[in-house]
Image (tube, rainbow, N blue to C red):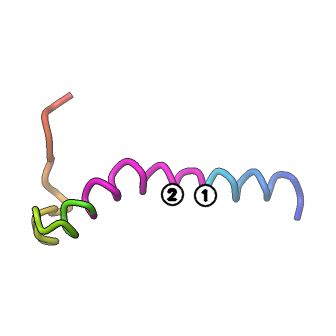
Amino acid sequence: MTIPLWVLLAFAVWTVLVLLSGVGIHRWSRILSCKAELADFPGGAAEGTPA
């Protein structure tokens, strides 16, 4: 593989890790601890305070 492909792969992995650590851990911890249901996080609804 060439260097540009390695950089593209690293960027894709970094993006997925940022999304999982920012949103995924919070939501899955609430779901697995039974504090929220899976359907409590609809895709089109804003959550939290406005920035």
The magenta region covers 13-28
Residue plotted at (22% across, 70% down): 32
Q: Quadrant of the N terminus?
A: bottom right
Q: Position of residue 44 (x, y in %)?
A: 17, 57
Q: Position of residue 39 (x, y in %)?
A: 12, 71
Q: Amino acid at mark 1?
A: Val
Residue plotted at (60% across, 58% down): 13
Residue bearing mark 1: 13
Question: Crowdedness of circle 1 by 10 Å Cα count: few (<14), some, many (20+)?
Answer: few
Q: Amino acid at mark 2?
A: Val
Q: Name the residue nearer the viewer: 25 or 33.
A: 33
Residue plotted at (33% across, 52% down): 23
Residue bearing mark 2: 16
Question: Looking at the magenta stretch, what is its main secondary structure?
Answer: helix
Q: Are marks 2 and 1 in contact (CB under 8 Å)?
A: yes
On screen, residue 22 versus residue 5, left or right, reads left
On screen, residue 45 versus residue 24, left or right, reads left
On screen, residue 27 versus residue 37, left or right, reads right
Q: Position of residue 11 (x, y in %)?
A: 64, 50
